[in-house]
Image (cartoon, helix red, strand yellow):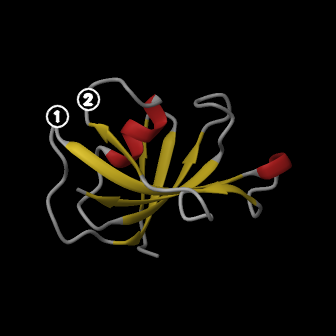
Amino acid sequence: MLAYPIRAMGVEKDLLKAGTGPKPVAGQNVTVHCTGFGKNGDLTKKFWSTKDPGQKPFSFQIGKGNVIKAIYLSVGFLHLDCIAQVAQSIGFCSGIRSSIFAVSY
């Protein structure tokens, strides 16, 4: 894990792997893997992942408002091939409290 967290508007990101490419720009499609933690309030327990059997990564367009704000704030400012652990303030987004995102496009 890198030594510094990134904080913005109720979202804190800890980079687990620095990205090697550019950050996405408004209007660009991105595809992400996501793993959600916080089952029954326990941040060590996974409740869902795009890497679970039968699941797949999801894609969205940056800046179009078609994902919850925490995902945009998490992914929209990460470099290509970055992996980050993201913690959101309670009530900020759909009850998810901690997620790991891997960014590709």
Residue 97: image location, x then y, percent:
66, 45
Label 2 sits on a secondary structure element that is: loop
Nearest the viewer among 105 and 98 is: 105
Q: Residue at x 62, y 63 (%)?
A: 52
The circle on residue 63 is 2
Residue 87: image location, x then y, percent:
57, 49
Amino acid type of the residue tagged 2 in the rendering: Gly
**Viewed as shown, does residue 47 lie left or right of 33?**
right
Q: Quadrant of residue 69?
A: top left
- The 10 Å Cα crowd at callout 2, few under 14, some 14 to 19, many 20 or more, is some
Q: Residue at x 56, y 56 (%)?
A: 55
Residue 103: image location, x then y, percent:
33, 59
Distance from disc 2 to disc 1, alpha carbons, whole Å, reads 5 Å
Quick one: which residue is furthest to the top in this view? 65
Label 1 sits on a secondary structure element that is: loop
Question: Which image quadrant: the C terminus?
Answer: bottom left
- The 10 Å Cα crowd at callout 1, few under 14, some 14 to 19, many 20 or more, is few
Nearest the viewer among 97 and 64 is: 64
Residue 59: image location, x then y, percent:
35, 45
Residue named by callout 1: 26
Query: How many callouts does the rendering have?
Result: 2
Q: Residue at x 68, y 34 (%)?
A: 90
